[in-house]
Amino acid sequence: MDHPPRPQSSLLVAPPELSPLEQEVLDEYERLAENMKTLAALLDHLASAPATDILDGLRDLERKTSLVFTLLKASVYSIVLQQEIDWGGAAAGGGGGHGQGLGHGDGDGDDGQEDE
């Protein structure tokens, strides 16, 4: 009593007594097993990579991260300094002379004093 071959996407043979949900669970486990094999192969490849390549990549990443951190600190400092200048200018009646000439103004050349 030969059964005709059924087209199956999975490697597991599905007996007829399995429900569709059970078959779906088995298919998911099969995909999970394949993903785990792929992950193991990738980790094996990474573990066999020369340490100098990994260290060079990490140094490059550290350099870029350091640059971004420096730029972020400079931006925050510029914003805080500009707020202090603005608040100091309003509190001193528009004087706000400290901090001028440092290149942190709004660029319009207005120093709070009217032209004569």
Image (cartoon, helix red, strand yellow):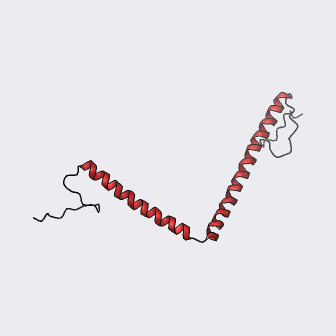
Residue 68 x/y as whole percent: 69, 53
In the image, residue 116 lies at what x, y percent?
90, 33
Residue 71 percent coordinates (x, y): 72, 51
Asked which quadrant contains residue 96, the reply is top right
Query: Which quarter of the rendering shows the N terminus?
Result: bottom left
Judged left or right of residue 28, residue 45 is: right
Along the line of sight, which residue is nearer the eye, 4 or 75?
4
Q: Which residue is painted at 65% across and 66% down in the image?
A: 55
69 relative position to 17: left or right = right
Tell me residue 102's x, y (percent): 84, 46
Give the tally of numbered discs: 0
Quick check: 59 above or below 98?
A: below
User: Who's the residue at 77% across and 36% down the image?
Assistant: 83
For this rendering, which residue is in front, 115 or 51?
51
Residue at 60%, 72% (x, y): give it: 50
Specify the farthest residue to the right: 116
* In the rendered image, the vertical position of residue 78 relative to residue 8, given as above or below: above
- Which residue ends up furthest to the left in the rendered image? 1
Which residue corresponds to the image point at 85% horizontal and 30% vertical from the top-left? 94
